[in-house]
């Protein structure tokens, strides 16, 4: 695969993960609006949706390759995380904790790594 194909595949994977994240967070916010959820369930649910979005993006990136799916999953996860970090820094009104974000980062990277491996093995 050429470098431009690799970048296109990574960008497609990140866009797919982003679309899933937006739709799932919208549905989750509708559920939170109509039902009274405790704050712990709200934050936990959003964290699960973020991990699921990363996993979907990484599986998609890993499926596009025949080898080194873990790298493609990791790269797509890194791109997704950087975009999410930039959006959070721009939108948050002082409520965003960068330290808490970096504490969650190893789990997010592990999820994208596993998604890339899973996606590469789906192709076989």
Image (tube, rainbow, N blue to C red):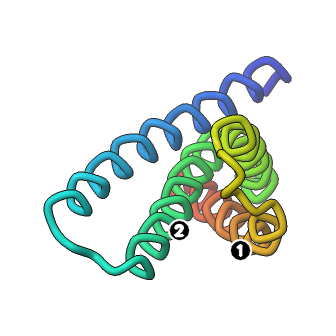
Q: Could you tell me if the residues under marks 1 and 2 are in contact, i.e. CB atoms within 8 Å?
A: no
Q: Which residue shows up at 48% across the image and 71% down it? A: 43
At numbered mark 2, what does the secondary structure look like: helix, strand or loop?
helix
Considering the image in quadrants, where does the C terminus appear?
bottom right
Numbered mark located on residue 107 in the image = 1
**Residue that protrudes farthest toward the left in the picture:** 34
Q: Which residue shows up at 84% across the image and 68% down it? A: 99
Numbered mark located on residue 81 in the image = none
Where is residue 39 shown, x and y percent of the image? 41, 77
**18 or 93, nearer to the observer:** 93
**Residue that protrudes farthest toward the top in the picture:** 4
The reply to whether residue 73 is visible in this rendering is: yes
Read off the residue under disc 2. 47
Instruction: Answer above or below: position of 59 versus 20.
Output: below
The reply to whether residue 65 is visible in this rendering is: no
Marks 1 and 2, the one that precedes in the sequence = 2
Residue 9, located in which quarter of the rendered image? top right
Considering the image in quadrants, where does the N terminus appear?
top right
């Amino acid at each position: 695969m050429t470098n431009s194909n690799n970048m296109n595949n990574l960008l497609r994977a990140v866009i797919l993960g982003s679309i899933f994240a937006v739709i799932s967070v919208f549905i989750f916010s509708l559920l939170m609006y109509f039902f009274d959820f405790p704050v712990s369930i709200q934050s936990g649910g959003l964290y699960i949706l973020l991990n699921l979005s990363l996993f979907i993006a990484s599986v998609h990136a890993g499926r596009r390759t025949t080898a080194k799916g873990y790298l493609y999953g990791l790269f797509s996860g890194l791109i997704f995380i950087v975009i999410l970090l930039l959006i959070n820094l721009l939108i948050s009104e002082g409520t965003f904790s960068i330290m808490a974000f970096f504490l969650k980062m190893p789990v997010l990277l592990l999820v994208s790594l596993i998604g890339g491996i899973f996606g590469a093995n789906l192709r076989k």
